[in-house]
Image (cartoon, rainbow, N blue to C red):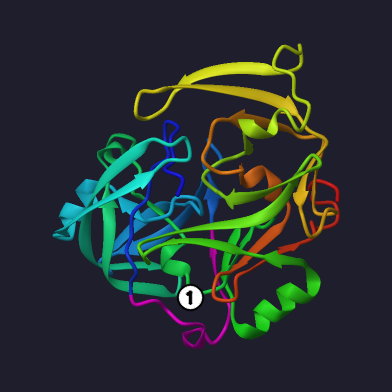
Amino acid sequence: MRFPALGLLAFVAATPLPAQSRAGIADPASVPFTTSAEGMLIVPATLGATIPLQVILDTGAGLDILAPSLIRKVNGRAAGAFTGIRMTGDRVDVPLFIVPELALGPIVRTHVVVGGWDTLDSLHIDGIISVNGLRHQPFTIDFADKMLTFETEQSLAQRRASGHSTPLQLSDERGKALDLFAAFLIGNQTGECELDTGSQGATVSTRYMAPLGVDTSSYDVARRLRRTITGATEIRYVAGVSQVSLATSPEVGLAQPRVTFSDIIYDCVIGTAFWSGRALTLDIPNRQLTVSPPRAGGGAPSH
């Protein structure tokens, strides 16, 4: 689970809810999204059947989290706490609450357990939605047309026929938090990377630096210091690698990208830049990721 850090992100908390099944959706349903200045995906949602929200769709958050002011508005009930670990290894404790209803497109969940995070109120952010509540519903994030589509069996088959598919790996914490991983190539090295729409670029564990021949004293390697949300000092290095691509489909990737190396608990984290101009389909029930090729003339990275 990657508990978001920067001036905006969050760790997310939600517990398994009565999930919408694929059989409940007769036709594909789409919801437009926008992007914030920080590159976050912003989608409309509804709390308690009547309160409209603008939430961050963050596939790396693990759990759903809402601003405490909104939880109070729907008389959310205290439901204990959840402890998670950020990708930098920091521990984060989040209070949990039960809210009556939370809807995203055709997916309506009731008696939803969410985390409360005071920082969201201070940043005027309604909340963050994870993939935990979408574990039974395949969906596509179209980064070219900025549409979130909830797939049917038929539309899902069409996505697979026109795209490149690869196995999706799940990190499921007792049904309370869910993170998604897939195999990628970082240069000539293979890694199990978290899929994280809460990040923009790619972050790679520092243990890959030596195998990739990254020399921290080189003039083209940048060294950056920053504070984590827990106050710890974090050292990062930014350097170029030959490629970042799907391990099973190397033609789907970025050539000569610059990535960030950091002391993280995962092999790597893949942000939104990788999917620019592409459509990313996540079929959690069948543990499959499908990426459609970029549209002609869409300015997407070349294969």
Percent from the top left, x then y, of residue 49? 28, 69
Count of number-bearing discs: 1
Position above or below: 285 against 201:
below
Residue located at (32% from left, 40% from top): 92
Asked if residue 23 lies in the magenta stretch, the reply is: yes
Q: Which residue is mark 1?
A: 136
Left or right: residue 195 compared with residue 85: right
Residue located at (62% from left, 49% from top): 193
Asked if residue 303 lies in the magenta stretch, the reply is: no
Residue located at (64% from left, 33% from top): 207
Magenta residues?
A: 18-32
Task: Answer few, some or many: residues within 10 Å of disc 1's Cα (few below 14, many 20 plus, some between 14 and 19).
Answer: some
Nearest to the observer: residue 75 or residue 98 = 98
Query: Residue 86 is drawn in which quadrant?
Result: top left
Q: Let me know if residue 20 appears in the view.
A: yes
Percent from the top left, x then y, of residue 77? 14, 60
Q: Amino acid at mark 1?
A: His
